[in-house]
Amino acid sequence: MNFKINKLRLFLPVIALLATACGNNTNTAEILTENTQEEESIPNPVRIDSTIWSMELDDVKVTWIRDNAIRRNNDLKLFGDVPQNIVDSLGIAEGIPSSMSAVLIQKDSMTILCDAGLGMPESLLVPSLNKIGLNPEDIKLVYLTHLHPDHIGGMMANGEKVFPNAEVYIAKPEFDAWMGMTENNQMQTAFAKIYEENIKLFNFNDTLPACVIPMDAHGHTPGHTVFQAGKALIIGDLMHGMALQTAHPEFCASYDMNPEEAVKSRKKFLNYAKENKLTMVGMHLPEPGFYHTGIIYFIF
């Protein structure tokens, strides 16, 4: 595949016309536009490596790191009964391009890792950090959007800390909810024990190091968190299928623990990003991992 970044600017009802092309690894793509107004000045992501992309948004550098070794499409069944007319109009019959990813924020001489992937033997997070000159011991700050296994699995290996020097920030409602469960929380309790001395709990809208603001995006999990760093919005699992959910945020992936609240959060932050001209960076967005209202960044 030839890697080249471009932008697709269009209205939301046709936002996923490119999804099938990306999923099939085609070598060409057409730039579609239905907006005659002058486009905002938004930088393109820069390819650091085949699975690493970065973007500078004012004084914040954001780097998206794909953790899964092989590109993936999410099956439409994950989103319930999606009407055929929506499937056809969005071009997603073959599934929705997605990923399992982590994000680095670099600001004010601080480097922050947001989430850590699943931590499987084939996971790319640590090798990718090495490629950009970082070892796990160099990571001093970890911000977790929530405590699902594909976000904390990479924090541990063989019962030991992968990031031994990191302060680990977690929303108090998220941590308390998982620690209060009586089943299906074995990984979460193991993680809490391993990182017990490193964990720092925050409340929503506190100011974290590097002036990062954590915001309440509950629904996917009880304390699911979105982080704002300047013009970047780290959205965690706000969307598992961008091609569908930007156009139709009412559809939930089966992973959402409280679908009704997840829909409210998704709509809220899609509007918030649009109103404040923020660029979303997501752990399940397709490569290169960025979304700005009306603009899909894509590779071909």
Image: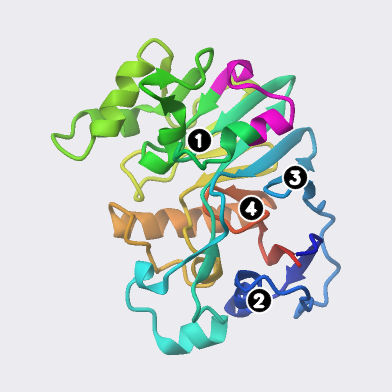
Which of these two is toward me, 165 or 3? 3
Q: What mark, if any, has residue 49 been given in the picture? A: 3
Kindly check if marks 4 and 2 are in contact, taking CB atoms under 8 A apart as contact. no
Q: CA distance from mark 2 to mark 1?
A: 29 Å
Q: Give 104 or 224, whichever is nearer the viewer.
A: 104
The first of marks 2 and 1 along the sequence is: 2
Residue 242 x/y as whole percent: 54, 64
| Residue linked to disc 4 | 289
Q: Can see residue 30?
A: yes
- Decide: is 180 above or below 40: above
- Position of the N terminus, as image quadrant, is bottom right
Q: Amino acid at mark 1?
A: Asp
Q: Are marks 2 and 1 in contact (CB under 8 Å)?
A: no
For the residues bearing labels 4 and 1, Cβ distance under 8 angstroms: no
Calculate the distance from the C-alpha at mark 4 to the C-alpha at mark 1. Answer: 14 Å
- Kindly report the distance in space between the C-alpha atoms of the residues bearing marks 4 and 2: 16 Å
Q: CA distance from mark 4 to mark 3?
A: 13 Å
* Residue depicted at x 55% and y 86%: 89
Three-letter residue code for mark 4: Gly
Given the current orientation, which residue lies at the most extreme top position? 197
Q: How far is mark 3 from mark 1, CA to CA? A: 20 Å
Q: Which residues are magenta?
A: 128-141
